[in-house]
């Protein structure tokens, strides 16, 4: 086996194992990438929600990042929950200095159960200090609305407008994920579609596929962003990386759809092998 590329995740720990660094490292491994990590926060959580958050001191976060950068030289970096404005600013300074290659920023602000995961000042510091240096930003509709200080998109036009507006913060690309819409079928029923919109300076691209209906959806955002980072680490072009990441998440949802783990919203599957990663974009997913 040849030496794998390295990806770095800078994010919080999920004690339930469904999201955060645990999901990132599992996704990296499934896609043939060696995962390294810098823990920004320790969360006390299970499938029912987040009970407590303990943020790691910013100097300890930076020390973790610096030793990984110096020794392992990550080909891509995924940023998730940072917790405090000071940590956002410190990571942003590293990005501004060009130290964080192929930076994918998942602006984690609220847990899937509704628990705030960002202290005062994080949102504004994300806008000013970190997002402008990202190769890709991956907000869901609620996070995109928070970054733009507006209401979440409910139509494709609004989702497209918000993705394009976020480019104004300085990042190279934005994909706004997670909007569901109905699709009229020949029999007159409406089956839901999951719609993501990718905006770059040169184009806007819409991805859609039938929604996977399941209660086990904890960790989808982390898995998607870390799958994109894995693809970028393996030199896959961005649009194809988005498509591959969508395939990864859809398979993770399908594989976990019948699981009975915990008493709340269960995790997506990181157990079974993910789709093969090739340089050619998968067909039939949009």
Image: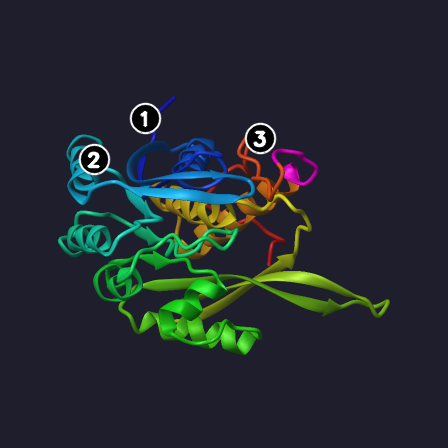
Q: Which residues are magenta?
A: 255-262
The overriding secondary structure of the stretch rendered in magenta is loop
**Residue at image point 33% right, 70% down:** 167
**Label 1 to label 3: alpha-carbon separation:** 22 Å
In the image, residue 82 sits, relative to residue 274, either above or below, namely: below
Which label lies toward us, 1 or 3? 3
Element carrying mark 1:
loop
**Residue at image point 15% right, 41% down:** 59
**Label 2 to label 1: alpha-carbon separation:** 22 Å
Which label lies toward us, 2 or 3? 2
Label 3 Cα neighbours within 10 Å, binned few <14 / some 14-19 / many ≥20? few
In the image, residue 179 sits, relative to residue 148, either above or below, namely: above
- In the rendered image, the quadrant that contains the N terminus is top left
Element carrying mark 2:
helix
Image side of residue 222 versus residue 190, left or right: left
Q: How is the image coloured?
A: rainbow
Q: Give me the disc on residue 272.
A: 3
**View extreme (right): residue:** 187
**Label 2 to label 3: alpha-carbon separation:** 30 Å
Label 2 belongs to which residue?
A: 64
Label 1 belongs to which residue?
A: 3
Residue nearer the viewer, 167 or 13: 13
Element carrying mark 3:
loop
């Amino acid at each position: 086996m040849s030496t794998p590329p390295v990806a770095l995740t800078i994010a919080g720990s999920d004690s339930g194992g469904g999201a955060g660094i645990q999901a990132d490292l599992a996704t990296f491994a499934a896609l043939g990438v060696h995962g390294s990590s810098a823990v920004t926060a320790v969360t006390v959580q299970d499938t029912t929600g987040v009970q407590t958050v303990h943020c790691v001191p910013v100097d300890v976060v930076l020390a973790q990042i610096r030793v990984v950068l110096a020794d392992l030289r990550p080909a891509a970096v995924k940023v998730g929950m940072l917790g405090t404005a000071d940590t956002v600013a410190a990571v942003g300074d590293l990005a501004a200095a060009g130290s964080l290659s192929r930076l994918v920023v998942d602006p984690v602000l609220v847990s899937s159960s509704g628990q705030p995961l960002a202290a005062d000042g994080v949102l504004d510091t994300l806008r000013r200090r970190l997002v402008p240096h990202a190769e890709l930003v991956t907000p869901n509709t609620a996070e995109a609305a928070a970054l733009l200080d507006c209401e979440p998109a409910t139509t494709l036009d609004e989702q497209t407008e918000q993705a394009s507006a976020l480019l104004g913060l300085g990042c190279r690309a934005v994909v706004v994920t997670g909007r569901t819409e109905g699709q009229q079928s020949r029999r007159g029923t409406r089956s839901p579609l999951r719609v993501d919109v990718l905006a770059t300076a040169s184009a806007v691209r819409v991805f859609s596929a039938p929604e996977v209906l399941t209660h086990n959806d904890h960790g989808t955002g982390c898995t998607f962003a870390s799958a994109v980072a894995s693809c970028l680490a393996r030199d896959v072009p961005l649009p194809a990386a988005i498509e591959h990441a969508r395939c990864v998440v859809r398979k993770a949802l399908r594989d976990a759809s019948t699981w009975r783990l915990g008493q709340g919203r269960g995790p997506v599957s990181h157990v079974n092998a993910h789709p093969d990663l090739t340089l050619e974009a998968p067909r039939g997913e949009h």
